[in-house]
Image (cartoon, helix red, strand yellow):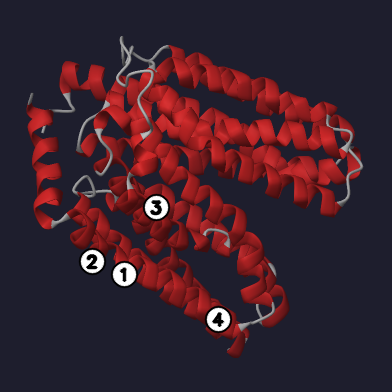
C-alpha cells in the first residue's frame, strides 16, 4: 500500500484528511447544537404543534432520501470538491432559514431543503473521499471523519443543553446562526482541498448505473434493516429506563456518553481490513449479532434490582457499541468497495437512500417496540437486525461471486501501487 507517512503521505493523506476532518467537526458542532434545541424552538418560538413538527421532519426526510442519488451523480460528473463546497454554502443559507419558519408551510419548505442538502451532501462527501483516497485509505478516512463527526455532535449537544438550560428566543437565534456559520466555515475548508477531477467522469447523457444495479440495491436494503438500531440509545433506552426499570434516569445519559467515548476511541480500529468487501460483509454479520445481543441485554435490565441492572446496562452498552462500530465499518467498506470508481457519487447516494429511509422509519418503530411491546419488542428488534446482518456475507457470495469479490480486492491493491 502507498505510504501514508513522510512528505508524500502528508500531502496525499494527512493534509486532505485534516481539512475534511476539521470541516466535519465544525459542521457537526453546529448541527448537534441545533438538533438539541430544534423541537423546543419550533414549538415554543415558531409556535408549531408537535404533530406539525413530526410531520414536517418525516416528509422532509423522505424528500431528502429520494434526491440523494441524483445529487451524488453531480459529483461523478463534476469535481466533487466543488459540489461539496456549493452544497455546504447552500446549507448555511438554508440553516439560517429556520429563523423565518413561522408557519407550517415555511417550516416544511426550509426543512425539506435542508434534508435534500444533507442527504445529497453525504453522498457527495463519499465521492470526495473516493477521489482523494484509494483502497484501505478510503475506509480509514471515513472512519476518522465519522469519529470527528461524533465528537463534534457530542460537543454540540452539550452546547445545546446549555441553551436549553437558559431557554429563550435570543439564545435559540444564536444557535441557528451558529449552525449556519459552521456550514459556511466548512465550505471554506473544503475549498482548500486539492482538485479531485478536471473533466467529467460520466457522459452527460449516461443513465445512472447505480439505479440499475439490483445486487447493490439488495445490499442497500440489508444495510437499511441493520440501520434500524440507530435510535436505540437516544430514544428507546431513555424511555425504557424511565418506564420499565428500577434504574435512575441519569443512567440512560451515562450510557450514551459511554457509547460516544467508545466510538471515538475504537472507530479506526473497527475499520481495519474492511477495504476488502469480504471482510466488510463478515463485519456486518458480527454487527447484527452484537447489536441483537445488546438489545436483549437492555431488555433484561427490567427484571433486575438497580445495582445488578446497572452492571448489566454497562455490559449491554459495550456489546451494542461494538456492533455499532462493526456496522459503520462494514457498511462503509461495502459502499466503497462495490461501487465503480467513476460512479462513486451516485452509488453513495443510493446507499444513503436506504440509510435515510431506515432513519425515517426507525424512531417510531423502535419506540413502539421498546415501550409498548416491552421485552417482546426488544426481542423482535434483535432478531430482525441479527438476521439482516447475518445475511450479508452469503448474499455477497451469491450475487457477486467469490472471484468478483477477490477481483475487487486485487484491483484496489494494484491501484494503490500505481
The answer to whether residue 315 of the structure is visible from this angle is: no
Residue marked by disc 3? 220
Q: Which residue is mark 2?
A: 394
**Can residue 285 be spotted in the picture?**
yes
How much space separates mark 4 and mark 2, taking CA atoms? 29 Å
The residue singled out by tag 4 in the image is 299
Where disc 1 sits, the SS reads helix
Judging depth in this view, the residue of 29 and 96 nearest the camera is 96
Q: Name above or below for residue 304 compared with residue 36.
A: below
Residue 336 at what x, y percent from top left? 29, 40
- Quadrant housing the N terminus: top left
Q: Are the residues tagged 2 and 1 within 8 Å (C-beta)? A: yes
* 345 relative to 106 in the view: left or right: left
Query: Residue visible at 46% across and 44% down?
Result: 352
**What is the spatial separation of the Cα atoms under label 4 and label 1, in whole angstroms?**
22 Å
Q: Which residue is mark 1?
A: 390
**Quarter-of-image position of residue 176:** top right
Query: Which numbered disc, 4 or 2, marks the residue closer to the eye?
Result: 2
Q: Is residue 378 left or right of residue 386?
A: right
Nearer-the-camera pick, 120 or 43: 120
Q: Earlier in the sequence, mark 4 or mark 1?
A: 4
Disc nearest the viewer among 4 and 3: 3
Amino acid at each position: 500500500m502507498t505510504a501514508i507517512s513522510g512528505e508524500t503521505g502528508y500531502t496525499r493523506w494527512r493534509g486532505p484528511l485534516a481539512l475534511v476532518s476539521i470541516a466535519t467537526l465544525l459542521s457537526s458542532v453546529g448541527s448537534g447544537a441545533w438538533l438539541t434545541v430544534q423541537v423546543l424552538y419550533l414549538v415554543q418560538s415558531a409556535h408549531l404543534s408537535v404533530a406539525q413538527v413530526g410531520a414536517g421532519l418525516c416528509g422532509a426526510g423522505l424528500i431528502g432520501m429520494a434526491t440523494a442519488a441524483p445529487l451524488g451523480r453531480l459529483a461523478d460528473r463534476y469535481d466533487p470538491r466543488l459540489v461539496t463546497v456549493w452544497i455546504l454554502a447552500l446549507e448555511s443559507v438554508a440553516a439560517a432559514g429556520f429563523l423565518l419558519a413561522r408557519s407550517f408551510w415555511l417550516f416544511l419548505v426550509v426543512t425539506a431543503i435542508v434534508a435534500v442538502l444533507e442527504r445529497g451532501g453525504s453522498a457527495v462527501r463519499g465521492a470526495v473521499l473516493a477521489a482523494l483516497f484509494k483502497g484501505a485509505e478510503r475506509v480509514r478516512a471515513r472512519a476518522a471523519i465519522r469519529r470527528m463527526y461524533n465528537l463534534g455532535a457530542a460537543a454540540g449537544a452539550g452546547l445545546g443543553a446549555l441553551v436549553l438550560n437558559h431557554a429563550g428566543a435570543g439564545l435559540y437565534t444564536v444557535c441557528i446562526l451558529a449552525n449556519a456559520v459552521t456550514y459556511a466555515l466548512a465550505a471554506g475548508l473544503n475549498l482548500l482541498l486539492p482538485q479531485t477531477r478536471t473533466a467529467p467522469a460520466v457522459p452527460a447523457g449516461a443513465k445512472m448505473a447505480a439505479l440499475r444495479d439490483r445486487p447493490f440495491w439488495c445490499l442497500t436494503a440489508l444495510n437499511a434493516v441493520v440501520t434500524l438500531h440507530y435510535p436505540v440509545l437516544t430514544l428507546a433506552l431513555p424511555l425504557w429506563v424511565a418506564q420499565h426499570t428500577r434504574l435512575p434516569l441519569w443512567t440512560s445519559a451515562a450510557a450514551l456518553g459511554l457509547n460516544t467515548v467508545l466510538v471515538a476511541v475504537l472507530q479506526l480500529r473497527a475499520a481495519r481490513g474492511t477495504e476488502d468487501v469480504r471482510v466488510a460483509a463478515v463485519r456486518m454479520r458480527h454487527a447484527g449479532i452484537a447489536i441483537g445481543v445488546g438489545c436483549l441485554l437492555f431488555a433484561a435490565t427490567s427484571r433486575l434490582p438497580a445495582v445488578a441492572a446497572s452492571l448489566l446496562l454497562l455490559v449491554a452498552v459495550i456489546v451494542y457499541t461494538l456492533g455499532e462500530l462493526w456496522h459503520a465499518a462494514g457498511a462503509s467498506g461495502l459502499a466503497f468497495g462495490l461501487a465503480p470508481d467513476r460512479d462513486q457519487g451516485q452509488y453513495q447516494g443510493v446507499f444513503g437512500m436506504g440509510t435515510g429511509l431506515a432513519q425515517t422509519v426507525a424512531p417510531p418503530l423502535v419506540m413502539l417496540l421498546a415501550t409498548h411491546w416491552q421485552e417482546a419488542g426488544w426481542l423482535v428488534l434483535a432478531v430482525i437486525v441479527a438476521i439482516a446482518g447475518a445475511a450479508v456475507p452469503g448474499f455477497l457470495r451469491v450475487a457477486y461471486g467469490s472471484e468478483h469479490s477477490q477481483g475487487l480486492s486485487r484491483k484496489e491493491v494494484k491501484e494503490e501501487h500505481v
